[in-house]
């Protein structure tokens, strides 16, 4: 399983750093929604879902946190701690976010508006979805 992490360009000078993100340039999709999590409790685990079609980029713009990615076959843990690093999360990818530092601000850029129908919140249903998807891929070969 390949983890796709973007290192965004930093426009630094003696005043400090600045990162600019443009859709279809720095971000591989149209950005229709931005949301962020902060004041997350130390022992809190969030996420526990996949999306049928939504693509996202997670950026821990302050502090740090961990993201567990699970494609139904393999799991990887990614540590996010740099405000210029973006973790790409494709559709059909289960995610869990945890180990938030007290000061963590986790920002998410999303390719579509909030739609509860796009969520897969049941892990068994997620496994079935990815199995069906890989069967479809096989049939198309
Ligand atoms: P939730 O889906 O529980 O977050 P997590 O990613 O940790 O699973 O979202 C928390 C609440 O925020 C829930 O009431 C839905 C709401 N929400 C929106 O209104 N818009 C959004 O874009 C998101 C991500 C959540």
Image (cartoon, grey):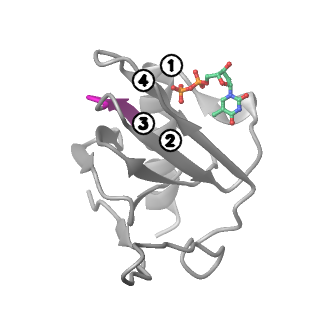
Dot 4 and dot 1 residues touching (CB under 8 Å): no
Q: Quadrant of the N terminus?
A: bottom left
Q: Is residue 51 visible?
A: no
Say whether disc 2 or disc 3 marks the residue closer to the N-terminus: 3
**Disc nearer the start of the sequence (4/1):** 4
Local SS, label 2: helix
Q: Which residue is mark 2?
A: 132
Residue at label 3? Answer: 94
* Residue sitting at x 38%, y 70%: 6
Who comes first in sequence, dot 2 or dot 1? 1
Alpha carbon separation for disc pair 4 and 3 = 20 Å
The span from disc 3 to disc 1 (Cα, nearest Å) is 10 Å
Ligand 1 falls in quadrant: top right
The Cα–Cα distance between marks 2 and 4, rounded to whole angstroms, is: 35 Å
Indicate if the residue with disc 3 has its beta carbon within 8 Å of ligand 1: no
Residues at circles 2 and 4 in contact by the CB criterion of under 8 Å: no
**Left or right, residue 109 beside residue 43:** right
- Which residue in the protein does label 4 denote? 40
Q: Residue at x 77, y 45 (%)?
A: 113
Q: Residue 73 falls in which quadrant of the image?
A: top left
Relative side of 25 to 100, left or right: right
Residue bearing mark 1: 122
Q: Which residues are magenta?
A: 94-100
Residue mark closest to the camera, 2 vs 1:
1
Sort mark 3 into few (<14), some (14-19) or many (20+) by Cα contacts within 10 Å. many
Q: Residue 84: percent from the left, percent from the top?
A: 38, 66
Q: Is mark 2 within 8 Å of ligand 1?
A: no
Query: Which residue is located at x 71 percent, y 67 percent?
Result: 30
Q: Earlier in the sequence, mark 3 or mark 1?
A: 3
Q: Position of residue 131 (x, y in %)?
A: 43, 40
Q: Nearer the viewer, mark 2 or mark 3?
A: 3
């Amino acid at each position: 399983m390949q983890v796709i992490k973007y290192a965004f360009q930093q426009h630094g000078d003696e005043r400090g750093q600045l990162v600019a993100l443009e859709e279809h340039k720095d971000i591989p999709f149209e950005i229709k929604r931005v949301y962020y999590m902060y004041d997350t409790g130390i022992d809190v685990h969030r996420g526990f879902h996949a999306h049928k079609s939504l693509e996202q980029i997670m950026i821990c713009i302050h502090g740090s946190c961990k993201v567990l990615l699970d494609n139904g076959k393999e799991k990887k843990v990614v540590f996010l701690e740099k405000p210029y690093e973006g973790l790409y999360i494709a559709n059909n990818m289960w995610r869990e976010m945890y180990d938030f530092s007290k000061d963590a601000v986790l920002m998410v850029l999303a390719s579509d508006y909030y739609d509860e129908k796009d969520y897969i919140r049941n892990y068994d249903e997620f496994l079935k979805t990815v199995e069906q998807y890989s069967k479809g891929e096989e049939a198309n070969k």
